[in-house]
Image (spheres, coloured by chain):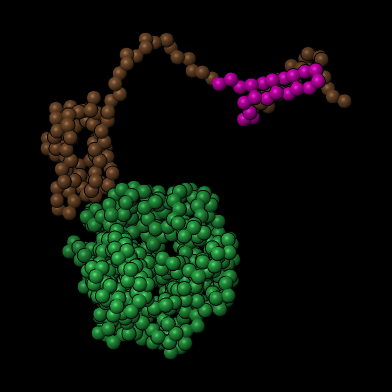
Chain colours: A green, B brown
Amino acid sequence: MFRKVLIANRGEIAVRINRACQELGVCTVAVFSEADRDSLHVRQADEALCVGPGPVSRSYLNIPNIISAALVTGCDAIHPGYGFLAENARFAQICADHGLVFIGPQPSVISAMGDKATAKRVMHEAGVATTPGTGILDSVDEARAAAENVGYPVLIKATAGGGGKGMREVRSADEMERAFTSARSEAEASFKDGRVYMEKLILNPRHIEVQVLGDSFGSVVHLGERDCSVQKPSHQKLIEEAPAPRLSPAARDALHEMAVKACRHVGYTNAGTLEFLVSGDDVYFMEMNTRIQVEHPVTEMIFGIDLVKEQIRVASGEPLGFTQADIRVRGHAIECRINAEDAEHNFAPQAGTLETVVFPGGLGIRVDTHVYGGATIPPYYDSMLAKIIAFGDTREAAISRMERALRETTIAGVNTTIQKCLEILATREFREGRYDIGFLPALLLSTAAAH
Amino acid sequence: MSETLVDLSPTVVRVGALIELFNASGLSRLVIERADERVEIARRPRIASVPFAEPLAAEEPHRIDRLSADLVGIVRLSRPMPLQGETLAGDRELAYVEALGIRNPVRSRGAGRIVAIPITDGQVVDYGQTLFEIDRG
């Protein structure tokens, strides 16, 4: 087991990683930007070093300062969290070059699977059904030509993308130029990689993903699926749940089997998620995220397994502590992302200082957060304040418990998505488990029309 | 029937009691008014007495430059070691920050007097950490 791990991230996931390390008896080093000096993970880690000013590219993406911080504090490993450098194969290689273990898959696997366009090709080779589309597109003209083949409507997507960034829908040829250029610049700004590819836009599919874990001894297990179809128009997730409601046993088994098959094909190690689009009975592989994901808690709750600890164990050379036969689903879990956003005005991000903060509790409620009363929200980063996770023996119990928890939650000082989450949970579509990625955009439109 | 403060000694006793209560309270002013009497108790801020002195000659404020690290690494003072109070005639290398095997010089960026060296040789430094404070005069 490692002696000391550097957490190359911020916010709630940095708190999460710090907790897993502490429970494993591993010392932690936090890195922070000047804007995050008073952040919770900085206070909770054993050591903390400032790596740059507020802007992301000069701090959380500052590879030299992060590597140097790990070396001068004597770290064995670096946990990259999600976003930032988590799927940066070059960073993973640099870690290895400096004798630091990168807690995640091997650089070559990150390259193969983290690059969305390449991943689709690899999956296709593995015999996994993929969404119709193209490889990297270099020009607007190439994109237009490709769209004629694929058939409108299409989606331009960043190959290094995630979190809904660098994605644009294109319904016709005259929308292509604007969509192509803006997707590229958003991708460049968010991931330092402006390359984009194209996929057929499947209308209103469900977004269902499968959690996997692999160790360095060839073991691969899946930890079930999550339904992440409640997404804002920007494709950013808002509510996730596990297991996915209304999924036939055949479709469920197919998703799990494809995920494990894909992982064995590439020799996948550490944690990862395979995302699929499900439309009726059709299941298409969309992309793989070679990292821990924001919504990992819902999987942890239904399996009783600490995924971040497993990541650390696997990276330190231990085998997985369980086989597929050892683990079973129990109950149902839902997660609501509480963001500092004005849900009534296009989820415009809010910055400022929080006043009173009260989080819910009680049996079956988990809160993953980095904020506290009086904390300031810097303007440089994503707007997520907290994740509230509700567990229940049944889906109905989990929903009911989540509603109770959201009503208990107070975050004063900024607008948040609490009310919007309550509104979503109260809809017939959500309660019946009959929703796809068109659901929330439609709900927002109808609410706006009513005002 | 309201009481009136006519007899003096009871007045002194009553006001004295009031003053005691007032002093023990956090109030800065208390006014009690009745038909034929008024009591006001107020705290006066204490002004420290300033001894009479010659007015200071008008002086330019000193400009203190903070030289800070923009890297994470280990700071090593240059030789000859810069000392607190030392006057620098011009631009000079004061130290370097060792990061990833590369020496990154920290220069004085001009003349001045070193007023503070809040770091020690061989110490880990992070982004924004003050290495030298220089009075440019």
Res A175 → quadrant:
bottom left
Q: Residue furthest bottom?
A: A250
Frontmost residue, A331 versus A424 = A424
**Residue A216 location, x and y as percent?**
26, 77
Look at 50% across and 52% down and name the residue there: A414
Mark count: 0
Quadrant occupied by the C terminus of chain A: bottom right
* Res B42 → quadrant: top right
Q: What residue lies at 37% left-to-right and 66% top-to-bottom?
A: A163
A318 drawn magenta: no
Specify whether residue B44 is painted magenta. Answer: yes
Q: Is residue A289 left or right of residue B69?
A: right
The front one of A8 and B20 is: A8
For the N terminus of chain A, the image quarter is bottom left
Residue reaching furthest to the right: B1
Relative vertical location of residue A153 with respect to residue A190 in this rendering, above or below: below
**Picture coordinates of residue A330, whole percent (x, y):** 49, 80
Residue B122 visible somewhere in the drawing: no
- Farthest residue toward the front? A174
As drawn, A448 above or below B119: below
Task: Give the vertical position of A369 relative to B34 (above or below).
Answer: below
Whether residue A184 is visible here, answered yes or no, is yes
Residue at the image point whose x is 47% and y is 79% from the top: A244
Q: The magenta stretch spans which residues?
A: B25-45
**Residue nearest the observer in this picture, A140 or A113:** A140
Residue A375 locus on image (x, y percent) = 45, 50
Image location of residue B115, percent across then percent down: 25, 30
Residue A188, image quadrant: bottom left
The vertical placement of B35 against B128, above or below, is above
